[in-house]
Image: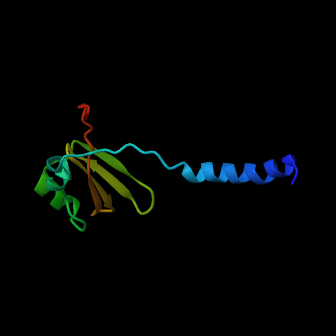
Amino acid sequence: MSPLAKYVVLLPLALFSLAIQQTAIAETIKIPVGQQNTAQHIAKPQMGLSMEQVEAQFGAPLKRNPAKGEPPITRWEYEQFVVYFESNTVIHSVIRHKPTNQAQP
């Protein structure tokens, strides 16, 4: 076998073996158990409540965004969560993310 033929055969095999050896590199983030799912303890409106029930239970929102679209979707913003209404009924509520400025070692 000629030297050129050896390179033609061996070069793809060498490249393939290098590709197989390369693995994904990712950073491992460790969150202490006491800090996991802390947002799950925040009370927020449940699906199906009316605007009146939400306001009676949680008070007036910090901001009422006007309805958009068809059917009309309204968003009320509270300090710890945001509530989405379709017409007058809660369809979803989400907890606001509060980033921490603390660097983890």
Instruction: Please tell me which residue lies in front, 64 or 46.
Output: 46
Instruction: Please tell me which residue lies in front, 11 or 72.
Output: 11
Left or right: 1, with 26 as reference point: right
Within the image, what quadrant is residue 49 found in? bottom left
Instruction: Please tell me which residue lies in front, 75 or 16.
Output: 16
Residue drawn where x is 78% and y is 54% of the image: 9
Find residue 36 and report its horizontal and vertical position in percent: 20, 51
Residue drawn where x is 55% and y is 50% of the image: 21
Q: Exactly how many numbered labels are in the figure?
A: 0
Within the image, what quadrant is residue 1 found in? bottom right
Residue drawn where x is 16% and y is 54% of the image: 55
Find residue 43 and report its horizontal and vertical position in percent: 14, 56
Quarter of the image with the C terminus is: top left
Left or right: 34, with 90 as reference point: left
Q: Residue furthest front?
A: 1
Left or right: 45, with 2 as reference point: left
Q: Is residue 17 above or below residue 71?
A: above
Within the image, what quadrant is residue 79 found in? top left
Instruction: Please tell me which residue lies in front, 41 or 70.
Output: 41
**Residue 101 can be seen, yes or no:** yes
Find residue 90 and report its horizontal and vertical position in percent: 27, 62
**Residue 43 can be seen, yes or no:** no
